[in-house]
Image (cartoon, grey):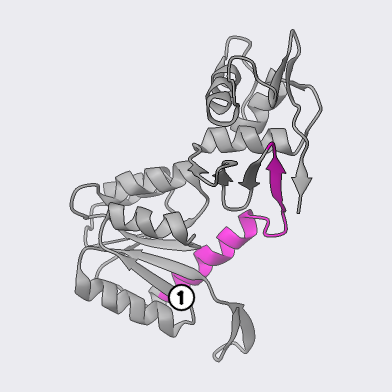
C-alpha cells in the first residue's frame, strides 16, 4: 500500500509501526505522528502486549520505550534482535549516554530522547525503514520443505501442524544457509563463516551445537535425521526437497 508524500512528491510505502510504551499519553502522541506520516500503527504497553501483536501481525518498525515495567526496553531489544531484523528505535526519557550505547550495541537501529521533536522523530523513522528495507530482500520466496514453511524475510518458521517455531539469530542463519544450498555437502568451516562471518577455528563446535538444536526443532526423529544429514568427515547436507513459491 502506498500514498503520496506531499512534501517530496513521491510515492512511499505504508509500513506497520508497533509502539511499545506504558504511558498512554506518549503512545497517543507517537501514534498520531506516525499515522500522520501515512503508516499503520499498533500499540502495546509492555513486553507481553508486544509479543501478542507480533505473533499475529509482523511489524516493520518497533518504537520501544526503555523504561517499561517488568522487562525493560533493553531486554526486549535483545529478544527482538535474536529473532528478526525488524527496525527498532528506542524512545526514552533517560539521558544517560550508557543506555544509548548499550541499546545500539545490542541491536537497536536508533535512539531518541523525550521530549522529542516530531519532525526529527519522523526523519529517524523514515531513515530506519529505508535501512531495514535495504537489508531484507522482499523478493526472496518462502521456502517449504518436509511440511515446514520458512519465510526467510520475516524469519517465520511454521511447522507442518501450523505452529510457529522460534529461532535464534544463529539458528535462522544456519537454516537459511541450508535452504539456500540444498543437496550440497557444506563443510563446517563454510557454515561457520555463513553464520558468524568470522575465521574458521578447528576447535569451534558452534556448527555442531546449532545443528543439534535445529534438528530438535525440525526433525521428526532428531537422533535419526532425514532433513539435515551428516556427511561423515565432510560436514552436513540439507536433504529435504525445497519448494519455492
Q: Residue furthest right?
A: 184
State left or right for residue 87 relative to residue 225: left
Corner quadrant of residue 102: top left
Residue 156's spot in the image, x, y percent? 55, 48
Residue 169 visible here: yes
Tell me the residue that label 1 is attached to. Answer: 40
Q: Residue furthest front?
A: 161
Q: Is residue 137 magenta?
A: yes
Q: Is residue 135 magenta?
A: yes
Residue in the foreground of this view, choosing between 157 and 219: 219
Residue located at (64% from left, 23% from top):
199
Residue located at (63% from left, 55% from top):
136
State left or right for residue 150 relative to residue 237: left
State left or right for residue 220 relative to residue 117: right
Above or below: residue 208 compared with residue 96: above
Q: Dividing the image into 4 quarters, which one contains the C terminus?
A: bottom right
Residue 14's spot in the image, x, y percent? 55, 76
Q: Dividing the image into 4 quarters, which one contains the N terminus?
A: bottom right
Residue located at (58% from left, 66% from top):
130
Amino acid at each position: 500500500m502506498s500514498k503520496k508524500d506531499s512534501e517530496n512528491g513521491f510515492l512511499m510505502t505504508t509500513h506497520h509501526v508497533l509502539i511499545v510504551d506504558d504511558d498512554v499519553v506518549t503512545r497517543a502522541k507517537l501514534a498520531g505522528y506516525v499515522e500522520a506520516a501515512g503508516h499503520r500503527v499498533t500499540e502495546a504497553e509492555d513486553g507481553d502486549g508486544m509479543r501478542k501483536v507480533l505473533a499475529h501481525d509482523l511489524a516493520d518498525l518497533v518504537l520501544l520505550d526503555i523504561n517499561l515495567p517488568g522487562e525493560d526496553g533493553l531486554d526486549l531489544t535483545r529478544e527482538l534482535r535474536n529473532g528478526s531484523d525488524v527496525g527498532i528505535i528506542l524512545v526514552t526519557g533517560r539521558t544517560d549516554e550508557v543506555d544509548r550505547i548499550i541499546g545500539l550495541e545490542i541491536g537497536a537501529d536508533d535512539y531518541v530522547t523525550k521530549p522529542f521533536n516530531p519532525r526529527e522523530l519522523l526523519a529517524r523513522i523514515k531513515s530506519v525503514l529505508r535501512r531495514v528495507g535495504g537489508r531484507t530482500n522482499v523478493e526472496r520466496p518462502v521456502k517449504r520443505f518436509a511440511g515446514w514453511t520458512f519465510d526467510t524475510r520475516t524469519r517465520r518458521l511454521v511447522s507442518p501442524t501450523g505452529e510457529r517455531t522460534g529461532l535464534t539469530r544463529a539458528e535462522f542463519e544456519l537454516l537459511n544457509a541450508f535452504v539456500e544450498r540444498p543437496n550440497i555437502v557444506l563443510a563446517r568451516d563454510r557454515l561457520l563463516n555463513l553464520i558468524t562471518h568470522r575465521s574458521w577455528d578447528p576447535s569451534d563446535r558452534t556448527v555442531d551445537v546449532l545443528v543439534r538444536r535445529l534438528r530438535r526443532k525440525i526433525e521428526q526423529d532428531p537422533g535419526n535425521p532425514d532433513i539435515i544429514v551428516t556427511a561423515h568427515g565432510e560436514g552436513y547436507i540439507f536433504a529435504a526437497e525445497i519448494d519455492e513459491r
